[in-house]
Amino acid sequence: MTLATFLIQCLNALQYGLLLFLVASGLTLIFGIMGVINLAHGSFYMIGAYMAYALAPFVGATFGGGFFATLAVGLVLAVLFGYLLEWAFFSFLYEREHLQQVLMTYGLILVFEELRSLIVGDDVHGVAPPPLLAGTLPLGELMTYPVYRLFISGVCLALALGMYFVFTRTRLGMMIRAGSTNREMVQSLGIDIKFLYRVVFAAGVAIAVLAGMVAAPVSSVYPGMGGTVLIICFVVVVIGGIGSIRGALLASLLIGVVDTFGKVFVPQAAGVLVYVLMALILLWKPDGLFKAG
Amino acid sequence: MALGAQAPWGGPAGPSPMDRSKLLFVALAFGALALWPLAAGNYGIDLVTKIMIYAVFALSLELLVGGTGLVCFGQAAFFGVGAYATVLLSPADAAASVLWLLPACILLAALYALAVGALSVRTRGVYFIMVTLAFAQMAYYVVHDTPLGGGTDGIYLNARPVIGGWLDLGKPLPLYGFTLACLAGVFVGLALLLRSRLGRALAGIRVNEQRMRATGFSTYPYKLAAFTVSGGIAGLAGFLFAVKDGLVNPELMSWHLSGAVLIMIILGGLGHLRGALVGAFAFALLQELFKSEAIFGTFAKHWLLGLGLTIIASVALLPRGLVGVPAQLRERLLGRRGTLRGTRGGA
């Protein structure tokens, strides 16, 4: 394996890991802060990807914009969708046991999948990256690397830093962190915890949808993508420790490396390697690598 | 000391009226199942055989979720191992004997459950749900991606197993009878297990694991035992399914099947063995309903939508499942104590 090939695989691993982190962080946040295990989180990723495909002609016709305009429109829709979904459905799940949350969100997955099937159909689609980012960067003498993949990594990194900033340096982040530790106390201090939860949920949905939209040009848009990403996110959360953003980041990058290099060196076992990794880490640390926080 | 839903048979004065009505229900159910082939045609026999296989599958999960409080989202893996073992161990051209094939498949499924359980049972709560799901997905990828499982096409079972020279499981009626016998055996076996000392310990773990450990019980081996037995029973269901369908494919290990069997026991009613029976029937009938083009026309191919909405509604509105509906209605109509005489309400 030449240095250039190795570098390419490293960049691929980084990109996959960061994308995974984006989706998994929403999952672990919603669980860590609101205590809701949301199986439908993978569906938001799928919705994002299908939005990137389905909204593009519409946005092009009405606003005359391209990829970035579609991203913006999709983001606004996602925030609205997340807000409404929390108000209509998820707010009833907070007091319920985990088993009931698992089942109701599983039912939600089925509903989302079929609605998507009704609205957009079951075909597999490709989404073209915007012309601005469709080029390649030279890497060494022979190899090149697609600019778009670097863009994905950049977006994920920017979002991750943004999340960190909001959580640790803003009042909103302070209230969210307080609400996750002691919900009643925060309420008795006069802070509207319901509104807070709605905001956090909407943000989690929006991040997952954005991840789906941004990933659409590199992975194709297909019906089962929500389920696939959901289960890998579960592995991320198990390895990283539930409720821990730091853990989710480390676990995502670890999985990115194992999966990418696994596909290169052991292609037949590639699908299984991530679970073997999870099994090994569980042997060592049954509660994941980090505690919540 | 009352330990959760599986109250002992009989207080000081013998079985209570509640226990008698449960027994009657179960006896009637099995009686109806035994007499069904007389009334039904081939389609009916085939359908109920499939439902009974689901019921065995659901009972295996009931031991884990309702009996021990371990919410496993990966039960389909053990079902799939049992099914694939059936096909892979059967000789390609001749019929195998059930007498060794069945125990072998159960054993293999139980071994996989032992391996997965040894790692998973150390985790708790939400972790356990995620870990069991992940391990089931691992099994799925093994049969999906490697030549071991025949890939996405699956493998065919060419000759159905037989018992000696007198029972051919390739014919619908003997298969029906054999499945009914397995279902009855599993039901009675689990009923006895849950009333035994092991079952009491599992009930204690379900109610409060920390308290169990404080009284000196080491909960890990008990949980692992329940997980392994449950995996073996799921393997039995897988064996029956492979024999019935003659074809195994990776979808038998998909997490959608794990979700479906979890729904079955919730729909039926958690904490009751007959809930698994009722839930399997209700789920299968709901599937048939939503898939029927006569009622839903072109929407029939989107039957998962109806199923998803039903799942959400049943979890929200029927907290105790279908088995708990009489009690729920009684409470609604007669007030909180639930009986006209106002003595003990509900066993």
Image (spheres, coloured by chain):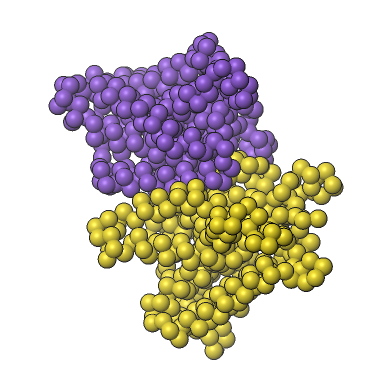
Say which chain is purple.
A
The image quadrant where one finds the C terminus of chain B is bottom right
Q: Is residue B126 visible?
A: yes
Near-viewer residue (B42 or A251):
B42
Residue B179 placement: quadrant: bottom right
State the residue lying farthest toward the right.
B216
Residue A213 in the image: state x and y as whole percent: 33, 29
Residue A165 in the image: state x and y as whole percent: 50, 13
Q: Is B315 located above or below residue B93 in the figure?
A: above
The image quadrant where one finds the N terminus of chain B is bottom right
Q: Is A15 located above or below residue B75 in the figure?
A: above
Say which chain is yellow.
B
Q: Residue at x 54, y 89 (%)?
A: B166
Q: Residue at x 47, y 43 (%)?
A: A105
Side of B235 relative to B10 (left or right):
left
Q: Is B108 located above or below residue A221 in the figure?
A: below
Q: How many marks?
A: 0
Residue A108 placement: quadrant: top left
Near-viewer residue (A213 or A92):
A92
Q: Is residue B94 visible?
A: no
Residue A142 in the image: state x and y as whole percent: 32, 23
State the residue lying farthest toward the front.
B341
